[in-house]
Amino acid sequence: MPTVRTSSVRKLSRRAPRVPPLRAPAAAVVLFLALGAGTVLSGCEYSYDDGRGALPVDTSTPVTDAALPRDPLLDLPVSGAELDAWAREVLPDSSGQVVYTDYGTVEEDEETKESTGRLPSGTYALTLACRSERRVSFTVRDSEFALVDLSLRCGTSRVNVVHLSKASVLRITVEARRDANFAVKISRL
């Protein structure tokens, strides 16, 4: 009888090859060096005595409040006694001889024209101020030139110094887009 050979088939399992776990010796070395360097460096300090003594200690109270905005009601035009008080406030006494002072109200989209008496030649300080929600334009002219042409933000005063080479009459024009108060003072320096 013929012999039949049977082959034995072995089943091989298909598993993923085994990978050894990763070690992080480099990360440990870097961490150790960083911590060690930080500890070593934190102990280093250079100091010397320059003879100036200790720094003064600031005992003042720190300012922690935010800046308060300006009251918008301060920009509204006033009249009567309030206008007189405002004009005295914005046109303080000056060191020179006051030769002209005027204040008043300008209606919306209108202009006011004033003129001084004849002023002798010399140097003058022109103080201009306004009170309105918008800017107010001031123009001061002599017989030939515009000495001052200014759009002033209200709530501030502006002083301009001008020199008159000959005796002149100054013409002052005040224009406003909204109702406004104005104040003008001319002092000889």
Image (tube, helix red, strand yellow):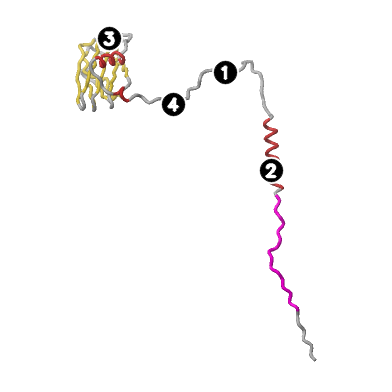
- Tell me what residue is drawn at x 21 percent, y 22 percent: 106
Say which quarter of the image contains residue 180.
top left
Q: Nearer the viewer, residue 154 or 12?
A: 12
Lower position in the chain sequence, tag 1 or tag 3: 1
Distance CA(mark 4)–CA(mark 2): 47 Å
Residue type of the residue flagged with mark 2: Val
Given contact means CB atoms under 8 Å apart, are the residues at marks 1 and 3 in contact? no
Q: Secondary structure at mark 2?
A: helix
**Residue identified by numbered label 3:** 98
Q: Secondary structure at mark 3?
A: strand
**Residue identified by numbered label 4:** 66
Lower position in the chain sequence, tag 4 or tag 2: 2
Predominant secondary structure in magenta? loop
- Is any part of residue 55 visible from this angle? yes
Residue type of the residue flagged with mark 4: Ala
Q: Magenta segment, which residues?
A: 8-23
Given contact means CB atoms under 8 Å apart, are the residues at marks 1 and 4 in contact? no
Taking the image as shown, residue 151 lies to the left or right of residue 32, namely left
Give the numbered dot on residue 30. 2
